[in-house]
Image: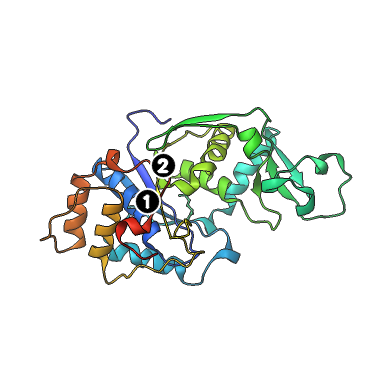
């Protein structure tokens, strides 16, 4: 963990797979308030490292929505599409310390959750097969950390995510690697994000340990779910935020986070955020992993 004196640096790291929706606004707002409450720095990182999943124009729309909601970031937006050399450097370091192997197993050879059972290591490699790069995780590896909201987490990483992928067969850098490299490069001390990423955190801490990076503090928020119990997401066609209603959207997000209600006379996003920053009480956020949108009176 960074020392107590490390100045707070938080971030919001959307993937441009669609416009901002209420679920992503909640994550952006909570990380923003958590940083601003202690006069910390708040960054935006655009996780545009998976072009096949991206929607043209989404990155620009997301940034515009953040601005409409008064969520002004510090420093320049970091675009992951421009960070290939940094990811290659981290892979080189992992390879030099003997932590990587190359896997050409087909989907049929892989176990549940894409786990590699090591067929590729004993088999003669075919000529120039597409290969994924995997990091070796000892079978008994456990990662333990205290999430600020969800409490103590103890993951048997070696069983849950054995030898996970750090560079995909299609040549794209894996999310787990890119996040770890960029959180370290940006000096992130606090990660506030949705609980859908809670099971990614042990993989990220594992890579931080292998790369000698500090581990930030983690806080995983409840995610907002639709009536089928699915997380509101771009994939589930969550409606885009209406940028013309920023005050109503921010009030809803604050209600979801169980924060004090800003007074009725608040007329601008700056006034509303100023109130929310001063009254930020993360201990009031429910420690559930999911909360249905219907609790906010929404028809999702
Ligand atoms: N880009 C990820 C997403 O939109 C979030 C990454 C993170 O916060 O670590 O789900």
Ligand 1 within 8 A of label 2's CB? no
Q: Where does residue 112 sit, x and y in percent of width and height?
A: 70, 46
Ligand 1 within 8 A of label 1's CB? no
Circle 1 sits in a helix, a strand or a loop, which is it? strand
Colour scheme: rainbow
Q: Residue at x 74, y 41 (%)?
A: 101
Q: Of 31 and 125, which appears nearest the observer?
A: 31
Q: Which residue lies furthest to the left in this view?
A: 265
Q: Where does residue 154 sit, x and y in percent of width and height?
A: 52, 30
Residue that label 2 marks = 188
Which mark identifies residue 178?
none
Q: Residues within 10 Å of mark 2 (few under 14, many from 20)?
A: many
Q: Of 117 and 51, which appears nearest the observer?
A: 117
Residue 72 makes an appearance in the image: no
- Left or right: 88 as drawn, with respect to 278: right
Mark 1 and 2 residues: CB-CB less than 8 Å, in contact?
A: yes
Q: Where does residue 133 sit, x and y in percent of width and height?
A: 70, 46
Q: Of 150 and 163, which appears nearest the observer?
A: 150
Which mark identifies residue 43?
1
Q: Residue at x 49, y 47 (%)?
A: 197
- Left or right: 223 as drawn, with respect to 80: left
Q: Where does residue 73 sit, x and y in percent of width and height?
A: 32, 55
Dot 1 or dot 2, earlier in sequence: 1
- Left or right: 102 as drawn, with respect to 62: right
Circle 2 sits in a helix, a strand or a loop, which is it? loop
In the rendered image, the quadrant that contains the C terminus is: bottom left
Q: Does residue 242 sit above or below 266 in this rendering? A: below
């Amino acid at each position: 963990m960074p020392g107590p004196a490390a100045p707070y640096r938080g971030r919001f790291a959307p993937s441009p797979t669609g416009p901002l929706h209420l679920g992503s606004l909640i994550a952006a707002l909570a990380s923003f308030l958590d940083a601003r409450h202690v006069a910390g720095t708040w960054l935006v990182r655009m996780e545009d490292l998976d072009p096949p999943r991206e929607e043209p124009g989404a990155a620009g729309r997301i940034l515009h929505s953040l601005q409409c909601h008064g969520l002004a970031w510090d420093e320049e937006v970091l675009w992951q599409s421009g960070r290939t050399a940094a990811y290659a450097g981290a892979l080189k370091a992992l390879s030099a310390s003997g932590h990587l192997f190359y896997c050409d197993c087909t989907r049929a050879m892989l176990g549940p959750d894409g786990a590699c059972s090591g067929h590729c290591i004993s088999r003669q490699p075919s000529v120039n097969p597409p290969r994924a790069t995997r990091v070796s995780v000892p079978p008994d590896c456990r990662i333990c950390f205290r999430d600020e909201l969800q409490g103590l987490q103890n993951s048997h990483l070696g069983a849950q995510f054995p030898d996970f992928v750090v560079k995909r067969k299609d040549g794209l850098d894996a999310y787990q690697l890119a996040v770890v490299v960029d959180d370290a490069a940006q000096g992130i001390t606090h990660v506030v994000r949705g609980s859908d990423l809670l099971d990614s955190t042990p993989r990220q801490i594992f890579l931080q340990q292998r790369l000698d990076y500090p581990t930030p503090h983690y806080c995983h928020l409840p995610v907002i779910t639709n009536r089928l119990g699915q997380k509101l997401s771009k994939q589930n066609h969550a409606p885009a935020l209406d940028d013309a209603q920023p005050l109503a959207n921010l009030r809803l997000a604050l209600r979801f986070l169980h924060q004090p209600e800003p007074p009725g006379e608040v007329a601008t996003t700056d006034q509303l955020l100023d109130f929310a920053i001063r009254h930020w009480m993360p201990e009031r956020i429910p420690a559930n992993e999911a909360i249905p949108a219907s609790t906010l009176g929404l028809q999702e």
